[in-house]
């Protein structure tokens, strides 16, 4: 009878595979697409500023708009649109906040 | 026959915070929009999303995403904003149970960022708490 020996490096090895990385990027692109739909529109500049980037091998969704924080989190006088947070959920994913260090 | 509606998460969470002794002790206001007077601290509760929880029948268990802006008063600065946000977070952590006729099953925090509000001069210290609250009627 064979004995099953778990691979302690399974998670790390799985996450390093091209297939897994592609799946992450597909999910990130889907969330970014949802975020662009949710983004408020005046000139369309904010929606165009939403992009998927790679940080330490992990895809992240971000905005390059210098006032992106106002659109995402609002202020005393600005509506909270939260396109990034809502976009992740709209794509069926789980949201975890990762503020820029 | 009137249709059944999902719980009013903003009201349930706001009422709960207002009635909790630890929040009352801070003499802070719990509001749905920026108050007219901003000299003392306040917590603004905003509903961002309300999704059907996977695995539950539609419109039964709802996954609410809420943003709680914890603003310091005019002179409280970072210490007051931090204390307020950590207190609100701790109080919400205790929330699961029967609240205002609604069953709160879980509270999770998915973000807590210090983002001063530059609409004020000088910028007003604020902690932005993002929480997901699951509840059903």
Image (cartoon, rainbow, N blue to C red):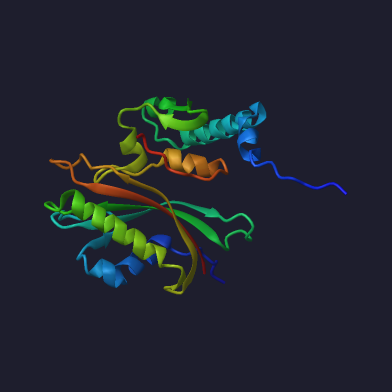
Looking at the rendering, which quadrant does residue A28 occupy? top right
The percent position of residue A19, horizontal first and vertical second, equals 67, 29
Q: Residue at x 20, y 49 (%)?
A: B78
Query: In the picture provided, is A36 more to the left or to the right than B60?
Result: left
Looking at the rendering, which quadrant does residue B89 occupy? bottom left
How many labels sit on residues?
A: 0
Q: Nearer the viewer, residue B128 or A37?
A: B128
The percent position of residue B36, horizontal first and vertical second, equals 17, 55
Q: Nearer the viewer, residue B44 or B125?
A: B125
The percent position of residue A9, horizontal first and vertical second, equals 63, 38
Query: In the picture provided, is B60 more to the left or to the right than B92?
Result: right
Pick out the residue farthest to the right. A1
Q: Residue at x 52, y 69 (%)?
A: B137
The percent position of residue B49, horizontal first and vertical second, equals 46, 50
Q: Is residue B49 above or below residue A69?
A: below
Does residue B34 appear in this view?
A: no
**The N terminus of chain B - image quarter:** bottom right
Q: Residue at x 85, y 46 (%)?
A: A2
Q: Residue at x 20, y 55 (%)?
A: B80
Q: Is residue A58 above or below residue B36?
A: above
Does residue B69 appear in this view?
A: yes
Q: Nearer the viewer, residue B106 or B118?
A: B106
């Amino acid at each position: 009878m064979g004995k099953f020996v778990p691979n302690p490096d399974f998670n790390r090895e799985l996450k390093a595979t091209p297939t897994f990385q592609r799946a992450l990027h597909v999910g990130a692109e889907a969330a970014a697409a949802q975020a662009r739909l949710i983004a408020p529109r005046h000139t369309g500049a904010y929606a165009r500023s939403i992009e998927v980037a790679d940080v330490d091998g992990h895809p992240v969704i971000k905005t390059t708009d210098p006032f992106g924080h106002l659109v995402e989190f609002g202020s005393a006088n600005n509506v909270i649109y939260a396109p990034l947070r809502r976009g992740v959920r709209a794509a069926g994913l789980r949201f975890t906040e990762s503020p820029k260090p | 026959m009137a249709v059944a509606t999902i719980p009013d998460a903003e009201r349930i969470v706001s009422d709960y915070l207002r009635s909790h002794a630890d929040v009352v002790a801070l003499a802070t206001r719990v509001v749905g929009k920026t108050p007219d007077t901003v000299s003392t601290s306040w917590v603004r509760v905003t509903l961002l999303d309300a999704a059907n929880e996977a695995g539950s029948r539609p419109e039964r268990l709802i996954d609410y995403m809420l943003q709680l802006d914890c603003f310091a008063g005019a002179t409280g600065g970072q210490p007051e904003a931090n204390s307020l946000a950590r207190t609100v977070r701790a109080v919400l952590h205790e929330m699961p149970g029967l609240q205002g006729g609604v069953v709160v099953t879980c509270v999770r925090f998915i973000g807590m960022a210090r983002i001063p509000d530059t609409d004020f001069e000088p910028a007003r210290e604020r902690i932005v708490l993002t929480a997901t609250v699951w509840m059903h009627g």
